Image (spheres, grey):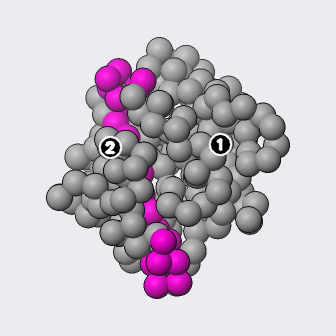
C-alpha cells in the first residue's frame, strides 16, 4: 500500500473542464453538468485502493449531507485498467452499485483530467466555490487504514461548511494520502 500525498494544486485555480462517460449512469458529464449552485467537489478515487475503501462510507455520507445543500459531486477514476483490471469501467459500475454511489462516477480513459487537476493519489479531493475557484484540496480527515483514528470527514466537511456559510477555510490544508494514480 503506497503512501502518496496530494500535489496540492494552487488555491484559486479555476476548475479544469472535462467531458467523461459515467460508469453508473448512461451518459457523459462535463464540469458544468455536475456543478453545484454553491460549490462543487471533485474526487479522484478508484475501486481497489485500501485508502478509498477505508473512507467510501464517509464519502457517501458527505454526498448525502451536502448535495441537498447545493454542492455538486463527482468521482473520477483515472487508473490504467490494463494494468489494474479491477479499476476497469465495468468494475467501476459494480463498485458504484455496491456502495450506493448516487453521484456520477466517471472514467478518465486518457488520464488527461487527472493531469489537468494535478491529481496524484486516491482519494484526492478538490473543492470549488460557486465561481469555480479552488478553495480546498487535501485530505478527508486524519484517519488512515490501520491508524485507529475514526473516519469523520472533518477536514473536508469543515471546508464544505466554509463554502456553504461563507466562512474562512482553515489553513494549513493537509494533503490527502493514498495509493498513487496508476499511470500508463
Tell which residue pokes out farthest to the right in this image.
Answer: 147
Quadrant of the image occupied by residue 154: top right
Is residue 75 inside the magenta stretch? Answer: yes
Is residue 124 toward the left or the right of residue 20 in the image? Answer: right
Question: Mark 1 and mark 2 in contact (Cβ < 8 Å)?
Answer: no
**Front in this rendered view, residue 103 or 163:** 103
Q: Is mark 1 on a helix, strand or loop?
A: loop
The residue that mark 1 highlights is: 139
**Residue pictured at 29% horizontal, 29% vertical:** 37
Name the quarter where the N terminus is drawn.
bottom right
Residue 13 image offset from top left, x and y in percent: 49, 48
Q: Can residue 8 be seen in this view?
A: no
Q: Residue 103: which disc?
A: 2
Which one is earlier in the sequence, the residue at label 2 or at label 1? 2
Magenta part of the chain: 65-86
Quadrant of the image occupied by residue 34: top left
Q: Can residue 170 be seen in this view?
A: yes
Q: Is residue 43 above or below residue 130?
A: below
Tell which residue pokes out farthest to the left in this image.
Answer: 26
**Residue pictured at 35% horizontal, 21% vertical:** 69
Mark 1, Cα crowd under 10 Å, few <14 / some 14-19 / many 20+, is many
Amino acid at each position: 500500500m503506497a503512501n502518496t500525498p496530494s500535489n496540492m494544486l494552487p488555491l484559486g485555480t479555476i476548475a479544469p473542464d472535462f467531458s467523461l462517460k459515467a460508469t453508473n449512469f448512461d451518459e457523459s458529464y462535463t464540469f458544468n453538468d455536475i456543478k453545484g449552485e454553491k460549490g462543487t467537489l471533485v474526487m479522484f478515487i478508484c475501486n481497489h485502493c485500501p485508502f478509498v475503501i477505508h473512507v467510501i462510507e464517509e464519502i457517501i455520507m458527505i454526498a448525502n449531507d451536502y448535495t441537498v445543500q447545493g454542492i455538486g459531486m463527482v468521482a473520477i477514476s483515472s487508473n490504467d485498467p490494463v494494468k489494474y483490471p479491477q479499476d476497469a469501467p465495468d468494475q467501476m459500475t459494480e463498485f458504484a452499485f455496491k456502495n450506493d454511489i448516487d453521484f456520477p462516477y466517471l472514467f478518465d480513459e486518457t488520464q488527461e483530467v487527472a493531469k489537468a487537476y494535478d491529481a496524484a493519489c486516491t482519494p484526492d479531493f478538490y473543492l470549488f466555490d460557486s465561481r469555480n475557484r479552488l478553495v480546498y484540496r487535501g485530505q478527508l480527515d486524519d484517519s488512515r487504514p490501520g491508524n485507529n483514528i475514526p473516519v469523520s470527514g472533518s477536514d473536508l466537511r469543515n471546508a464544505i461548511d466554509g463554502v456553504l456559510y461563507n466562512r474562512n477555510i482553515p489553513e494549513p490544508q493537509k494533503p490527502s494520502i493514498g495509493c498513487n494514480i496508476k499511470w500508463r
